[in-house]
Amino acid sequence: MMDELELLKRDWQKNDKKLPQLSFDEIYKMIWKKSSSIVKWIFLISIIEFLVPHLLYFLPSMSKNLAVWKDLGLGNFLLISNVVQYTVVLFFIFQFYKRYKEISTLDNAKKLLSNILKTRKTVKYYVIFCLSLIFISFIVMAVGIYLNEDPMAAMGYSYQPENISREQLKTTLIATVVVLGIVVTLVMGCIYFLLYGILLKKLKKNYKELKDMDI
Amino acid sequence: MTKDLEHQFVTELEHNQNIVHKVCTLYTNDRDSHNDLFQEITIQLWKAYPKFRGESKFSTWMYRVALNTAITLYRKSKKSIPTQDYESVMFKITADEYDPTEEQQLKLMYNAVRQLGDVDKALVFLYLEDKDYREIAETLGITEVNARVKMNRIKNKLKTILNP
C-alpha cells in the first residue's frame, strides 16, 4: 500500500490554484497594520506593570499614606525600601529590554519560544519582587503600629473610642493591616498569574512539545 | 529608499503568498482567522525583512517566519469553530480521476492533520512542502534524527486513523 502521506503530499501540492490570492495593494496595506502578537502583548503588559506601582504615588490618597508612614516613625524604612526598589526596578528594566531585543522571528521555533519565555520570566521575577515588597510594607506597618503609642493619632484620626481600650484598638488595627496585606498581595498575584497563564498557555505547550522531541 | 524596500518586499510576498496561505489553512478554521493570521505573518515578515537581505532564498526565510508566527506569536487560533464553507473551499479534493476511496482517504487525512498539535502540524507542513529533514530540523530547532523519529510517529498515527 502506498504511503498515506505521499498521497496527501501529491494532493497538497496540487492545491495551489484554490488558495486565495491577494493583490499587491492588499498586501501593501497589511504591512502598515498593527501587530497583535503575543510578544507585543507581553511587552505592553510588562510596561504597565513597571509603571503602575509608580503612578500610584501620584494619587492624593497615596501621598497622604506617605505622611502616615512618617508619623508612624517608618520614614527610614520607606527611604531604604525606595532606594532598593528603584535599583532593582532599573536592573529589571535593563534585563527585560536586553531579552526583549533578543526575540527574533528569524530564529528557529525552539529558540524563539525559549527567548520569549525567558523575557516573560524576567517580568515574573519582577512581579514577585513587587508583591513581596507590598506584603513586607504591610507587615512593617503592622510593626509600626505595634511600637507606636498612639497609632490612631499617627494615622491622622483624633477620634478616641470610648468602649474599647487602646490595647484592643491596637490589636484590631494590626490584625486589619495584616489581613489586608495578605488579601491585597493574593488578589494582585492571582490577577497577574491568571493573565499570563492565559497568554502563555499555547507557548508553554509548544515549547514543551519541542523540548520533548529532543529527549 | 524605504519606498523601494516596501515595493520589493510586497512584490516578493505577492509572488510567494501561497506559502503563507497554506500555513493559514493549516492553523486556522475559518476565513476571518485565516485573514487575521495572514496579516500577522505579513507584519512579522515585513518587520524581519531588513534583517533578511538575501542571506537565503526569500521563500526559505518565509517558511521560518510564517511558522514561527503560527506556532508562537499568533493568539486567536484556538477559539474559532470550523465552518463548512471554509473547509470545502480549502480542502476540496483534487484527485484527477474521481476515486471515491482516495477522496475519502484524503478527507480523513486532512482532518487528521488539522487535529495535530501546533508543532506536529509544522513538521507535517514542511514535509508536505517537500522540505528535507535537515531543513525541517533547522526550522524547528530540533536535531535531524529527532525530526525523522517524530515524523515516523506522525505517519503511524495517520495510518491508524485511516486503517482502524
Image (cartoon, coloured by chain):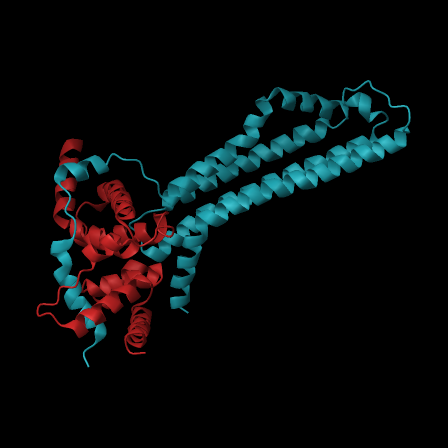
Chain colours: A cyan, B red
Which x, y percent locates residue A125? 55, 45
Q: Viewed as shown, does residue A206 lie left or right of A23?
A: right
Which x, y percent locates residue B131? 20, 64
**Quarter that holds the N terminus of chain A:** bottom left
Which x, y percent locates residue A127? 56, 41
Q: How many numbered dots are placed on residues in this image?
A: 0
Which quadrant would residue B114 be assigned to in this image?
bottom left
Residue at the image point whose x is 79% and y is 32% from the top:
A173
Which x, y percent locates residue A99? 42, 44
Residue A160 in sight in this render: yes
Q: Residue furthest left?
A: B97
Q: Viewed as shown, does residue B78 lie left or right of A151?
A: left
Residue at the image point whose x is 14% and y is 36% from the top:
A25
Residue B135 in sight in this render: no
**Quarter that holds the C terminus of chain A:** bottom left
Which quadrant would residue A8 be assigned to in this image?
bottom left
Residue at the image point whose x is 59% and y is 22% from the top:
A59
Task: Tell me if residue A116 comes above or below residue A31 in the rendering.
Answer: below
Q: Viewed as shown, does residue B11 lie left or right of A113?
A: left
Q: Nearer the viewer, residue A168 or A119?
A: A168
